[in-house]
Image (tube, rainbow, N blue to C red):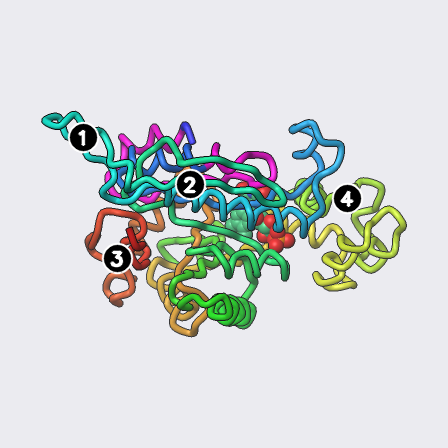
């Protein structure tokens, strides 16, 4: 949040999103912070709602154990309900700032909040007026059944990682169905799938870049990421162990075993560690600017996603290359804007205005 507040002054149109966990904060914290960022940026704020993943994060916050997975989402549901009540406690026209009459705000347009639920007891209103977007854009990245249900209820954009078009499309179709089941318009939630581009002046140059990058990936480092996501210790196992062998071990809890087996029982820890170290399973797109633009267009036009999360393979460089080499091709295809049509992030994403 401090970095985004700094970036407000350095940028004019970019959306500014930060991740905040509903497991370790209170709704009033988040509602205040994002309301302030939305005011400062004149409507460019977004909140990536996460529930946190591992026990080590719990220990940072004084808990011996992390709250159980589905309970974290139960808490998150109520958390967002309360945050919305706080953001909605001021009507659009409540702030009068009328010097003549000495009226700061019209109390008739400010609602009291009295929330008493299973997880939170909150009395409002929020002590910050309604923001330019009404609230930050809500982003989420759940992939489990419970996580998707949460996303379908609240998210306006979903980050996700899938290896190929078939999996991307299955995920997006499922999200759209669930969003509709929640009584929402399917287009009110944009599915943004992650890709990692390697761009070269020729295809051979792009391949060489990708190969050099992936050769640097040490499997042990990828396994550290994987172990932390699964809340298991993988250090007792040999790199040559297959996932089937690891999953059988009494050291591995059932949920982690299931996720490991989904990666293919015959895959070795070394192979999976290498994949995690090189791109955390984000698909790598390789080619010239025009070729990468064609690959993105194909994924989009075949219904794999509504947009992309561009994962940089290296910094600095990846974003600049993407903007200079790929975006002009997407613009020529009519798939990317040539100028901003609006000023808020909600407008950039093509999301409907919220009722005021
Ligand atoms: C692109 C992307 C970024 C993510 N960033 C974070 C993060 O910063 N903090 C976090 O706790 N989880 C993060 N996650 C994890 C998700 O919030 C979620 O926990 C994960 O995808 C597993 O889904 P589940 O919670 O439904 O089991 C991210 C996921 C994706 C796909």
Q: Earlier in the sequence, mark 2 or mark 1?
A: 2
The answer to which image quadrant residue 16 occupies is top left
Vertical side of 169 occupied by 137: above or below: above
Check if mark 2's residue and mark 1's residue have beta carbons within 8 Å.
no
Please name the residue shown 66% across and 28% down the image: 60
What x and y, as percent, mark residue 282?
Answer: 54, 55
Q: How many marks?
A: 4
Question: Dot 4 surroundings within 10 Å: few (below 14), some, or many (20 or more)?
Answer: some
Residue 232, numbered label: 4
Q: Earlier in the sequence, mark 3 or mark 1?
A: 1
Determine which residue is flagged by label 1.
97
- Mark 1 secondary-structure assignment: strand
Residue 86, numbered label: 2
What x and y, as percent, mark residue 51?
Answer: 59, 44
Question: Dot 1 surroundings within 10 Å: few (below 14), some, or many (20 or more)?
Answer: few
Residue 328, numbered label: 3
**Residues in magenta?**
3-30
In the orientation shown, which residue stands out farthest toward the right?
A: 250
- Mark 3 secondary-structure assignment: helix
Q: Is residue 200 left or right of residue 252?
A: left
**Residue 78 within the magenta-colored segment of the rendering:** no
Q: CA distance from mark 3 to mark 2?
A: 42 Å
Q: Earlier in the sequence, mark 3 or mark 4?
A: 4
Of tags 3 and 1, the one toward the viewer is 1
Q: CA distance from mark 4 to mark 2?
A: 38 Å
């Amino acid at each position: 949040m401090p970095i985004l507040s700094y970036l407000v002054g350095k940028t004019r149109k970019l959306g500014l999103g930060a991740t905040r966990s509903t497991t370790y904060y209170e709704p009033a914290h988040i509602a205040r912070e994002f309301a302030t960022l939305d005011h400062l940026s004149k409507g460019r704020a977004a909140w990536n709602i996460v529930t946190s993943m591992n026990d080590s994060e719990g220990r940072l916050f004084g808990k011996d154990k992390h709250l159980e997975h589905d309970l974290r989402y139960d808490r998150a549901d109520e958390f967002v309900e309360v945050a919305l009540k706080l953001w909605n406690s001021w009507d659009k026209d409540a702030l009068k700032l009328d010097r003549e009459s000495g009226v700061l705000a019209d109390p008739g347009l400010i609602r009291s909040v009295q929330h008493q639920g299973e997880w939170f007891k909150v009395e409002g209103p929020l002590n910050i007026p309604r923001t330019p977007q009404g609230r930050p854009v809500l982003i989420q990245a759940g992939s489990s059944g419970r996580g998707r249900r949460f996303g379908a209820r609240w998210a306006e954009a979903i980050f996700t990682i899938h290896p190929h078009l078939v999996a991307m499309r299955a995920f997006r179709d499922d999200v759209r169905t669930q969003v509709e089941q929640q009584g929402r318009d399917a287009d009110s939630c944009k599915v943004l799938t992650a890709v990692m581009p390697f761009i070269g002046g020729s295809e051979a140059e792009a391949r060489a870049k990708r190969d050099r990058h992936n050769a640097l990936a040490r499997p042990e480092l990828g396994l550290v990421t994987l172990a932390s996501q699964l809340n298991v210790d993988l250090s007792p196992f040999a790199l040559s162990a297959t996932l089937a062998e690891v999953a059988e071990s009494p050291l591995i809890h059932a949920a982690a075993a299931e996720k490991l087996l989904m990666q293919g029982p015959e895959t070795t820890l070394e192979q999976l560690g290498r994949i995690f170290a090189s791109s955390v399973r984000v698909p790598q797109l390789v080619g010239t600017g025009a070729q990468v633009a064609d690959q993105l267009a194909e994924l989009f036009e075949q219904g794999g996603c509504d947009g992309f999360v561009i994962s940089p393979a290296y910094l600095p460089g990846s974003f600049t290359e993407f903007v200079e080499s790929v975006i002009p091709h997407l613009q020529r295809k009519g798939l990317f804007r040539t100028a901003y049509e609006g000023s808020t992030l909600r407008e950039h994403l093509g999301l409907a205005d919220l009722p005021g």
